Image (tube, grey):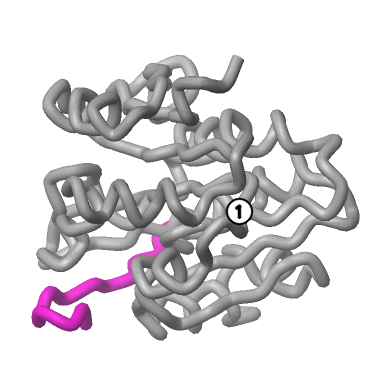
Amino acid sequence: MAPDGTVLTLHEHDGDYVIRVDGVELMSSRRHASEERLAELACLPTRHTPGAQVLIGGLGLGFTLRAALRCLARDARVVVAELLPEVIAWNENPSFSLAREALADPRVAVRQIDVACVLTESQGVFDAIMLDVDNGPDPLTTAGNARLYGDEGIATTIAALRPEGRLAYWSAHADPEFERRLRRAGLAVGVTKVRAHGSRGPWHRMLVAHRAEQP
């Protein structure tokens, strides 16, 4: 259960897994192409960075984490911030075909904590930050996630980046106002549309940003 009382449940059917929020599907192992693409867009530019430091906000079903590990070098370090202990337990459970092996990778540290707290305590630390804590700027899981997408939350996230760092947001829907908010904060923003199933299904948006003065 989320801090505001929202109920998350894990469902399995014929080897497929779904996390639902108050009965509404939040994510599914059948539709994960966009979660993987989020990691590729954020992490591939860091693959040659010695000792790259990466933050993933939201564990979900582990697809972003697994894709990030495929992109990163052996000396990289990945912090996964997941607010809900149940989500971590589902992924660690050997009875479920989720992210147990990825979580055991020596490059990975999992913290049961609000990603906003990690950002606040980590000024100038990360080469890449991926935020997939909810459905996007309009929160579905918990209302507290909305602060990450406001001006103050964006400023805190930028401060956690190294000068050449990349910031990537996952969103289920287009949100032009959020894009404008990122640009007002001094970021150059690119939007990549990815289908949920890779070649079919709804379009998801990956917003990748960096400081505007970068090439």
The image quarter containing residue 2 is bottom left
**Residue appearing at x 61%, y 59% in the figure:** 125
Mostly what secondary structure, the magenta segment? loop
Specify the farthest residue to the front. 213
Where 180 sits versus 134, above or below? Answer: above
Instruction: Identify the secondary structure beneath mark 1.
Output: strand
Residue with the mark numbered 1: 126
Q: Quadrant of residue 45?
A: top right
Do we see residue 204 in this rendering? yes
Left/right placement of residue 106 relative to residue 109 reads: right
- Residue at the image position 49 percent from the left and 56 percent from the top: 160
- The one of 149 and 152 positioned closer to us in this rendering: 152
- Residue 205 drawn in magenta: no
The amino acid type found where label 1 is placed reads Phe
Residue at the spot 12% in from the left edge and 27% down from the top edge: 177
Instruction: Judge from the rendering whether residue 136 lies leftward or rightward of residue 99; answer left or right.
Output: left
The x and y percentages for residue 169 are 38, 39
Instruction: Specify the segment rendered in magenta.
Output: 1-15
